Amino acid sequence: MPANVRRNQRIATVQTIGRLWRENVTQGHQLDLTGLARVYRMLRLIRRAEERVADIYPSDKIKSPVHLSIGQESAAVGVCDALNPEDIVSGTYRGHATYIAKGGDLNAMFAELYGKVTGCAKGKGGSMHLIDMAHNVLGTSAVVGTTIPMGLGVALAAKRRNQKKVVAVFFGDGATEEGVFYESLNFAALHKLPVIFVLENNGYAIHEPQVKRWATDRMCERVETYGIPTTLVADGDVLAIRDASVKYADRARRGDGPGFIEARIYRWREHVGPGLDFDQGYRSEKEFEPWAARDDVERIGRMLPSDIRAKLDREVEADVEAAVDFAETSAFPQLEELYHNVLAR
Ligand SMILES: Cc1ncc(C[n+]2csc(CCOP(=O)(O)OP(=O)(O)O)c2C)c(N)n1
Ligand SMILES: [Mg+2]
């Protein structure tokens, strides 16, 4: 092929990708008042639950390390609000938000963090290993990237059984550097699996910024080449994330295969632990300011009539305090629990 034809083809490809890219930048969408109230309540519940975790943490009553999603709630809430109860989520060690947004039992989550026998993993898993199969929360994992293929396996089973279930697979920007991420994209696209890939892009893998790890930040373009439609939500808008999730859940249920959402969001607290870490030198408070100013918990809260918002806030406080009480008053596991639900050869 002559060089000028090859060059023109290359330009056409770049232009097509550019157009797709622009179309995928969503603008934010409307919900009725009931829907807004539901979304706000969930955002607020996750925020307050994690703020309580952060308060309690220094007392050493919480026995496991905690990776908080404070500031990142919109990804889990936007996606899970678009799912049905029988749909499934596969999440990461930064999984409190995913677990709560999918309807995971809050009492059992707090009890798990306290290491109590009433915890969702009987006190043996801690914060990074939340599970609630009654609400279709698959077990989360500390091993980066692993819950992507696990989610795909469940999606493959659901498809073979013709169950019309959708699996939302959550992962961080660091997880996209694992080879299994790309294998999973290809496998899901090839077999038209009912998956929503949800990249929670907070710009960091521990302390390493994305600019030092990725040659370009155009992840959606890369994913499009697998034949998967994508949506970039560059400001983490919960309503735009919800809208994309509705679209991809419908598509997946029709049998047309996976969709991909990149939600750019910001982790407000340290990578692991309850504190702020702007004194660590790897990121600046200035970078955080615009994210704090457009906090979705506040933004969505302001869309509600103040009496409705106040009532929801009271309910949330009661739910969180009940969960803390439940954890505090539950028993630790008996010693023999060490031998239950353990695989040994
Ligand atoms: C396979 C594997 N490699 C490395 C680690 C160490 N590790 C723990 S968290 C993390 C960063 C992951 O970053 P990202 O996926 O962006 O998630 P985030 O913590 O930002 O939510 C790494 C490398 C791990 N747990 N598992
Ligand atoms: Mg990250």
Image: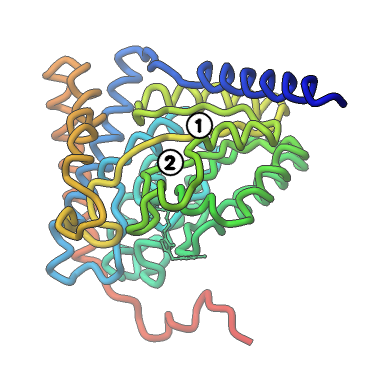
Residue at x 35%, y 81% (from the top left corner): 334
| Chain-order first, disc 2 or disc 1 | 1
Q: Is residue 325 visible?
A: no
Residue at x 40%, y 72% (from the top left corner): 124
**Residue type at tag 1:** Leu
Q: Quadrant of the C terminus?
A: bottom right
Residue with the mark numbered 1: 83
Residue 125 drawn at (x, y percent): 41, 68
Residue 203 drawn at (x, y percent): 37, 45
Residue at x 57%, y 16% (from the top left corner): 19
Is 263 placed above or below 150 here?
above
Left/right placement of residue 78 relative to residue 215 reads left
Is 33 placed above or below 184 here?
above
Neighbour class for label 1 at 10 Å: few (<14), some, many (≥20)? many
Secondary structure beneath label 1: loop
User: Looking at this rendering, what residue extends furthest in the right direction?
Assistant: 1
The reply to whether the C-beta atoms of the residues labelled 2 and 1 are less than 8 Å apart is yes
Snapshot quadrant of residue 337 = bottom left
Q: CA distance from mark 2 to mark 1?
A: 8 Å
Residue 344 drawn at (x, y percent): 59, 84
Query: Which labelled disc corresponds to residue 102?
Result: 2
